[in-house]
Amino acid sequence: MTADLSRWLWTAFAVALWLALIGLTVWRVRAAAQKAVEQARTLAEAAGDDAVLIAFASQTGFGEELAWMTARALGDGGVGARPLSFADLDLETLKGARRLLVIASTTGEGDAPDSAARFVRQVMAADVDLSHLSYGLLALGDRSYDAYCSFGHAVGDWLERSGAQTLFDRVEVDNGDAGAIRHWQHQLNQLTGATSAPDWTPPAYDRWRLVERTLLNAGSPGGEAYHLAFEPIDHAPEWAAGDIAEVGLPVRDGEQPASREYSVASLPSDGRVEFCIRLMTQPNGTPGLASGWLTQDAQIGDEVAMRVRANRSFHAPPAEAPIILIGNGTGIAGLRGHLKARAQFAKTGGAWLLFGERTRAHDALYDADLQAWLASGVLTRLDRAFSRDGGEHRYVQSLVAEHARPMADWVDRGAYVYVCGSLEGMSKGVHAALEAALGEERLMRLTDSGRYRRDVY
Ligand SMILES: Cc1cc2nc3c(=O)[nH]c(=O)nc-3n(C[C@H](O)[C@H](O)[C@H](O)COP(=O)(O)O)c2cc1C
């Protein structure tokens, strides 16, 4: 065999292997999505007319997960259940139900999750008679926010005004508190008559190993941002771009700190979970509990308890649709996951990234990846704003305003808009800039149809 022929054969073999890997990944993602749909259909079919309607409004997937656990618990107790997102909930469905369980998270500053925006505008604004309905309410929130559980309470107050009867007192869950969730489960047992249903155990963490930690922004005027990578020890779970990882922290001063959530910046085909984490500082100058541990104290090779959880409202749009990705700082993590996912398709509808950070010299996070994706056509367009490079402070929202025309064109061509990053520093400004660029009405329609999605913190 000549050297040329053998080189050709090796290249053909490598390309075939690469295509097979892509095919396998696409098949796996489709199979997982199909399984979720089938599960929903089976539950709904088994539910019958007297099913308990479980309406969930979730921004980052926790409420949705609890909705499915609730449906399973009712099913195990012999009571049919039908989980339904607020995105698909209408008055007719409520009129047709006799018993309703609402699982409602609060996001933003006391706001409804995006999936519930249409319901709030169109259904909750009206005076309706729901006196035939009995309901229970699980309100998810976090006491560190001023408007604690306020969307859950808004739904509860509206149901009261509409004449619905309570099945039991509202249950509030502060930051995933296990005790409150157990209380909800006991209320479910009352509904099913079960006496011995096991408590929902806290979700099992998998064992992962920290294998890489790289400082991404040496010399930056901002806080240090790190790229971290973890490899699974026992088994490799499946997940999709947009998903979130929940990290269990070690016990500190005899107390178990609440877990922390991070957007996953990699795909299962990478064989590792990757994050982009900023080292936070507390008001007294000491490092943040979770970010300090992950970026400073944990050593390469250390074991970390973690589970990856679905964040369906930030999953990818169809590959053939254009996507506009908007973010700042460590928000690049979730967006990088989406670009990696797009890179697995031979043909896509195009991707445009608008990103904001402090300096071009030190904070052009994942620049090598972005340049490679620009060169390969995965990324169609890249616009970055660096706020500390001198002159006027330009942020990512400034980019949205500057490029309002092409942005509207992309949306006309069916683009989805994904926003990932800080709530305070970015998402409110980006929202206002999008409203100005696209018009309030159009942005509302995008939200209602699931084409405007946010993963902000
Ligand atoms: C960006 C952001 C804003 C939030 N705002 C509030 C709030 O105003 N009031 C509140 O009680 N909880 C707030 N929370 C806490 C969430 O309601 C809580 O984490 C909940 O468990 C999330 O559930 P989900 O995953 O179903 O969206 C906020 C969380 C995030 C990430």
Image: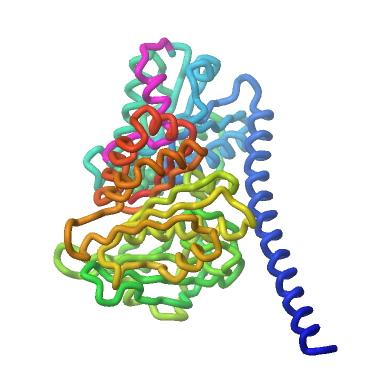
Seen from the viewer's position, the closer of residues 263 and 139 is: 263
Q: In the rendered structure, does residue 111 fall within the stretch colored magenta? A: yes
| Relative height, residue 95 to residue 353 (above, below) | above
Looking at the image, the residue that sits furthest to the right is: 1
* Res. 67 visible in picture: yes
Q: Is residue 351 left or right of residue 235?
A: left
Q: Residue 11 location, x and y as percent?
A: 72, 77
Q: Is residue 121 left or right of residue 21?
A: left
Tally the numbered discs. Answer: 0
Nearer-the-camera pick, 253 or 25? 25
Q: Name the residue at 33% across, 71% down.
A: 293
Q: Position of residue 396 (x, y in %)?
A: 30, 52
From this view, report whether residue 235 is shown above or below residue 26: below
Q: Position of residue 160 (x, y in %)?
A: 35, 18
Q: How is the image coloured?
A: rainbow
Q: Which residues are magenta?
A: 109-129
302 on left or right of 160: right
For the N terminus, give its image quadrant: bottom right
- Residue 333 within the segment the image draws in magenta: no
Depth check, front residue: 333 or 358: 358
At a point 32% along the width and 69% down the height, the residue shown is 225
Residue 17 place in picture, x, y as percent: 72, 70
Ligand 1 resides in the quarter of the picture at: top left
Could you tell me which residue is drawn at 33 percent across and 32 percent down?
Answer: 151
Residue 181 in view, yes or no: no
